[in-house]
Amino acid sequence: MSGVVGELARAGDALARPTLRLLDGKWGAFRVAVLRSAFSRDQRSIQVDALHTQVDTYLGEMLGEGIEVPASESGRVLCNAWVKNQWLFRDNAPDGSLVYSLTSSSLEALDLIQNLSRDRALVSESRLTMILDTVRRWATEASADPQDRVDRLNAQIRELEVERDRIAGGGGVAAASEDRMLDGYANLMDLIGQLPSDFKRVEESMLDMHRQILRDLRDEERVVGEVLDEYLESQDRLLRTTPEGRAFDGAFELLRDAELMNELRENIQVLLGHPAAEALDGRDVTELRGTVTVIRQGTRDVLDQRHRLSKTLKEHIVNNDPLAERELERVLRGIQRELMTWMETAGPRSMVDVDLLPPVAKIGHLREKMYDPAAAAPPPPLRQADDDIPAPPSVEELRAAGGPSLEQMRAALIDALMESGVATAAQVFNALPTDLRRPVEILGLLHILSGLDDSSIADGTTEEFRAIRPDGHRRTFLAPTALLSSHHAERLAAAADEGITDA
């Protein structure tokens, strides 16, 4: 057998991965252009609404240039489709907002496009030297024979001593040529470009572990101790046996060594100080300068994901009551389990009809209480209360509680003005008899004066009306000053003779 069947299966599995599906098809270049324009090393996540608007802008720019784009597709629809195809990841940011970020498959595809777009030799001295140095270093680490390791270390020491003595004896030191440096830059950027996808794979593995543990806790088919043991075992297996886990573990050890991080940062500055660095693209220079940031950010994202997983386990252990086996709790957990299963295949606008309340039970009328003869008895007869009847009010009391005495007020006003000639309304009122100085009589006086169109009302000034209640209490009221004369008395008298109530 030639093994072609097995190769066909492996090729089919590789082509079915999201990495190659992103590059495949009519819109592969469109997807790569949009994702590379939206995301970068500095812009690792974008808010959901912002990315929808950004993709709409890209669509408009391409249409303006006559470039064919997916028809009848908006930024929201495209982003939702990319999430479903595992090219975008949608999650909550630390501030609670919903954000998009690239998956490890998308990062691998974009790195592949980036590498293919660079002009470089596939086989070079720097690359072979890097391979030889790496093989030599790991061969030393792999050797379990103490004498063999000592021999290897002595050989390296002799090589370094010879080079040191040559330089110390006046030997020349020539900087690497531009071609050699450019090739070294390309090899270095290849290695650095693989870091984000490696970190993202660790983060996604943590997320899958998180979902599996939540599913196990909701099912309650196993005790919490078994779930914790599996979590610790899976975490150790992830960091020790998978390539991305080993990369993260090495990066984490690197972050703990401050001197090594400073050395890395200084060496990158030396590399960028070479004249050959001027030929690099601005994006490549940014990637080289951000190497330490990429390592720190990738490690921080993985640690944050692991912290969320540990927090979920802690909250479940603290809040879980092993004795709470009520029927309602089991029903709710079953509903939540079915909902999570439905969400794995449901689209963004899928709907399901859910009855918020159960249907009303159809039962006959139930008597709420038995017949009570006392409830049907007539009320007792009313008691005679002739002795408790109060004395009826007199006419004077009713009059004192009634409205203003317009006729008496008009007559008193005419007499006062005829006698004095000129006076204000308050002066006339304050000189009236007690029975005409009730507070309500002020309203009657103002009502009478409202018919005098030529009455002199002073602007901004008031005067006091000292009223007397029927019970003898005195009250003072303020009203606009109104200057009256005998002319007004004549008008009031003429109106009274004609039977007009308002002058």
Image: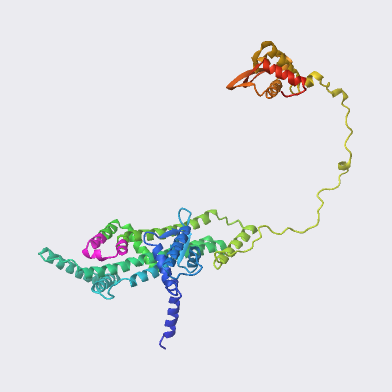
Q: Is residue 474 left or right of residue 82?
A: right
> Image quadrant for the N terminus?
bottom left
What type of secondary structure mainly makes up the magenta span? helix
The residue at the point 81 percent across, 54 percent down is 365
Work out whether 96 lies above or below 202: above
Looking at the image, the residue that sits furthest to the top is 419
Residue 291 horizontal/vertical position (percent): 32, 61
Work out whether 428 lies above or below 114: above
The residue at the point 86 percent across, 42 percent down is 375
- In the rendered image, which quarter is residue 218 located in? bottom right
Residue 178 visible? The answer is yes
Work out whether 501 lies above or below 369: above
Q: Is residue 459 left or right of residue 175?
A: right
The residue at the point 39 percent across, 64 percent down is 37
Looking at the image, the residue that sits furthest to the bottom is 1
Residue 84 horizontal/vertical position (percent): 50, 67
The answer to whether residue 271 is magenta is yes
> Image quadrant for the C terminus?
top right
Q: Which residues are magenta?
A: 267-286
Residue 320 horizontal/vertical position (percent): 55, 55
The residue at the point 71 percent across, 15 percent down is 414
Image mark count: 0
Q: Nearer the viewer, residue 452 or 280?
A: 452
The answer to whether residue 78 is magenta is no
- In the rendered image, which quarter is residue 165 located in? bottom left
Residue 405 visible? The answer is no
Q: Nearer the viewer, residue 468 or 155?
A: 468
Q: Nearer the viewer, residue 120 or 474?
A: 474
